[in-house]
Image (cartoon, grey):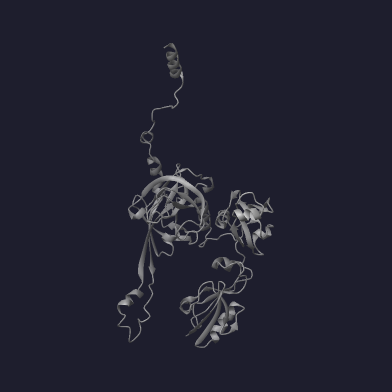
Amino acid sequence: MRVLLLCLTAILAQPALAQTEVPQSQAQISLSFAPLVKQATPAVVNIYASRVVQRNRSPFADDPIFGNLFRDFQQQGRPRIQNSLGSGVILSEDGIVVSNYHVVGQATDIRVVLNNRQEYAAKVLLGDEESDLAILQLEGASDMPHLPLRDSDTVEVGELVLAIGNPFGVGQTVSSGIVSGLARSGTATGNARGYFIQTDAPINPGNSGGALIDVEGRLIGINTSILTRSGGSNGIGFAIPSGLVAQFVKQAAAGNTRFERPWAGMTAQPVNADLSETLGLGLPGGVVIADLHAASPFAEAGLRTGDVILEVDGMAVNTPAEALFRMSVRGIGAEADVLYARGGTPTHARVAMIAPPEDPPRDTVSLGEDAALPGLSVARVNPGVQAELGLPLSTSHGIAVLDPGPYGTRAGLQRGDLVLRVNGAPVARPGDVERLMRRAGRLIQIEALRGNRRIILQFRI
């Protein structure tokens, strides 16, 4: 009995394992995100965008015989209004807003509604379909609530996050979750291609362009897409990191209307287990350079085909999309520290972030109304044209189609085609296309290269 009493005395004398204290606020009593939501939601807006879409016109619309028979189908040729609904985030007092390109891209009318129901007209300052980001300016805005940007490289898996947006158009909604993955590339749907933060916070249609914030109310990403089979959130959502958003804001402030990415001038592929063993690496990781342009900044820094890029600015890269993201965040005009391996030996190099060189000059030529294919625009291939059209590095010369124009499209020409001959005459310069088109009769034959396939287009005007 005495031993039992001594044990109880010892236990009672010890400090409590779980310290308790009186709650100091209503937030502590309710254990909720309410204070954070009140702080952040005024800076998250609903976006209503519309654009005019020209429907395909019936080919029988003007036919004197078949026109009446296809009168009902002529309605399809009339323009229609296409509406889109999404979200956005205010980033500055003067009304700079970031959203997804697929929400506001090519919109002719944009209305932005704050959570207090105040409305503003907005215009797109800078948009990029590949990154699926757009920067807007609210007209006449001042003293706007806004969210600070957090460096997305400091985000860790397991952090609590909130997703704020306008899902299904029901109004502003908040959902919670965690960061469930980083460096997600090639997995998101929609227009965006690149590097994403993965979250299990429910993201549904209409959340696009909304905010993904941390527990301090800082923006870490822009919600852009979900991975789903049913059309609803299945716990796998993707957000564009705030690091790229910051670069978009910087370029918009500099007056850019098109997002400019640094040019790598190379093609690369991920290093798998088999490649890792062949290249003398301990573990799979990094990207191996498969092809390198002579003017590439990586070549200028001493890298060559077969080298394995492991890190850019201290951050590991395991896919080409991750490497491009790191370069895009760094921005044109800066330098990046690149860690690469050659023969298993790691080496550092300073690589300049440059725009695609316009050498040789592209010498763009656009055909006028008196030409055989009015609206056709062609240019000499150079690194800038390669990057713009997504041409492979092996396509280092030729005359590329920038815009086929309305008649060229009907004839079968496509953006990115390389024009080789017009009516049997070879094409060496953009001006040759214009000259040969002016001399052409009613029958025109164009020989072109589309990818690795040679095509011949023949039509009568």
In the drawing, does residue 302 fall left or right of residue 443? right
* Residue 310 visible to the viewer: yes
The x, y position of residue 311, in whole percent, is 61, 51
The x, y position of residue 461, in whole percent, is 47, 85
The residue at 61%/48% (across/down) is: 314
Q: In which quadrant is the N terminus drawn?
A: top left
The x, y position of residue 211, in whole percent, is 43, 50
Vertical order, 230 against 413 (above or below): above
In the drawing, does residue 68 fall left or right of residue 153? left
* Residue 91 visible to the viewer: no
Vertical order, 288 against 457 (above or below): above
Towards the viewer: 245 or 21: 21
Towards the viewer: 121 or 28: 28
The residue at 64%/64% (across/down) is: 293
In the drawing, does residue 301 fall left or right of residue 39? right
User: Toward which corner of the image does residue 137 lie, by quadrant?
Assistant: bottom left
Towards the viewer: 128 or 255: 128
Residue furthest to the bottom in view is 441
The x, y position of residue 312, in whole percent, is 61, 52
The residue at 43%/61% (across/down) is: 102
Q: How many marks?
A: 0
Vertical order, 270 against 200 (above or below): below
